[in-house]
Image (cartoon, rainbow, N blue to C red):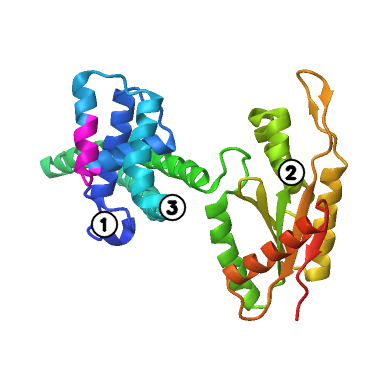
Amino acid sequence: MALSSDWKTEAGLFKECDRRLAHETLQTLKQLKIAPQPKNFTLWFRYHQQADQRLVDEIDALIESGEPLSRDVLSDLYSRHIAQTIGTKGLDSTVEKMEAAARGFLGYMADAGRSSERHATNLHALHTDLADDTANAVSDSSVQSLFDQLQQMSRENAQLSQKIAATSHEVAEIKESLRHTREEVWTDGLTGIPNRSAFDNRIDQAIADAENGRGLCLIMADVDHFKRVNDTLGHVMGDKVLGIVAKILRHQLKEEDFVGRYGGEEFAVIVFDNDLSGALEVAERLRASLASRRLCNRRTGTYFDPVTMSFGVTAYRNGDRGADVIQRADAALYDAKRSGRNCVRSIQER
C-alpha cells in the first residue's frame, strides 16, 4: 500500500525532510546517551540540518576527540550557537513552526493508520467471502492466485500499520519535546513564573483585546530595599525571597490574570476585566498579603522582617501601545517608592 499522492496536503507543514531530520536527531541522542531534553533536541536538530557549519565542525571535532558531551559542554554549545543566534523570540517562532509541523504529521499518520486498519478489515472480509463462495466450486488457479495476492496484501498492510505506529510514536516524542522547549523559552528559571519575553508577548495580546473592549490594567511591583535583603541574608536567600514573592503574587490572582518577572526584583501583573479602581484593590490585596508574611529560614529557624513591595497601577486608554501602559505603571511605581514604599499608587485616567 503506497502513501497518498497528496502527501504534502495531508501532512501539512511537516515535510519529509523535517521528519527525517527529527528521526535522525532522536537516534543520535539515543546513540550518544544524551538526555532527550528540549534544548538538546533543538541543538542536535540544528546539527543534522547542517545549516550552521561552525556548529557542525565543533560537534564533529568533539566527537572525534572523544571528549564527553557533558551537560556543561552541550549547554555552552546551545548558548553560543542557538540562543545567541536566533534569540528568545526567534526560538519561539521556530518552536511554533515545528509544533505545527508535528501536529500536521500526527494528524496525517492517524488518518493513514485508520485507513490501513479499514483496509485490513476489508481484505479479511473479502478473503472470507471468496472462500465461502468457492468452497463447493471446482478449484481454479486464478482463484488461488487471488487468495495468494490477498494474503500478501494483508501482510504488507500489517507491516505498514506497524511503521505508522512507530513513526507516530517518534513524532509524538518530538511534539512533547517541543512543548517543553516552549515552556523553557517563556519561563523565568529562578522563580518559575513567566519571564520578561513572556510578558512582552502577553501585553501585546492584552492590548489587542483591550482595543476590542476588554478591561485591562497593569500593575508594576518592586521589592522594597532588595539590596538590603541581599546584603543581610545573602544572595542565595535573596533568590529564595524572589521565588516566595512570585508564589504569593500568583496565588492571590485570578487564573486568567498574568504575573511575570519583569527583571531583577521587579514584577509585572496584567489584570483583565477590571477598571482602575478594581486593579487598585488587587494591588492593595497583594501588598497586604506580602507585608503580613514573616519569612523563616527553615534550616536555622530564624525569622526575618516582612518583605514589602511597592506597586504602581494604571489602566488602558484608547490608543495605548504596550510601551505607553508600561511607562505609566512605572511612573506610578516610582511615585510609590518616593512616598515611603510598601504602598500602592496609580496614574489616574484623564
Residue tagged by mark 3? 92
Q: Quadrant of the C terminus?
A: bottom right
**Of callouts 1 and 3, which one flags the residue occurring earlier in the amino acid sequence?**
1
Residue tagged by mark 2? 225
Amino acid residing under circle 1: Trp
Residue 164 seen in the figure: no
Residue 341 seen in the figure: yes
State left or right for residue 29 relative to residue 294: left
The answer to which of 251 and 309 lies nearer the viewer is 309
Quarter assignment of residue 147 = top left
Q: Measure the alpha-carbon separation of dots 2 and 3.
A: 35 Å
The answer to which of 339 and 74 lies nearer the viewer is 339
Q: Measure the alpha-carbon separation of dots 1 and 3.
A: 27 Å
Comparing labels 1 and 3, the label whose residue is closer to the camera: 3
Residue tagged by mark 1? 7
Q: Position of residue 207 (x, y in %)?
A: 61, 71
Amino acid residing under circle 2: His
At label 2, counting other C-alpha atoms closer than 10 Å, the crowd grade (few under 14, some 14-19, many 20 or more) is few
Q: Position of residue 149 (x, y in %)?
A: 18, 41
Residue visible at 76% across and 43% down in the picture: 248
Please report the bounds of the magenta region as a residue range: 49-59
Residue 181 forms part of the magenta stretch: no
Say what secondary structure mark 1 lies in: helix
**Of callouts 2 and 3, which one flags the residue occurring earlier in the amino acid sequence?**
3
Amino acid residing under circle 3: Asp
The answer to which of 216 and 79 lies nearer the viewer is 79
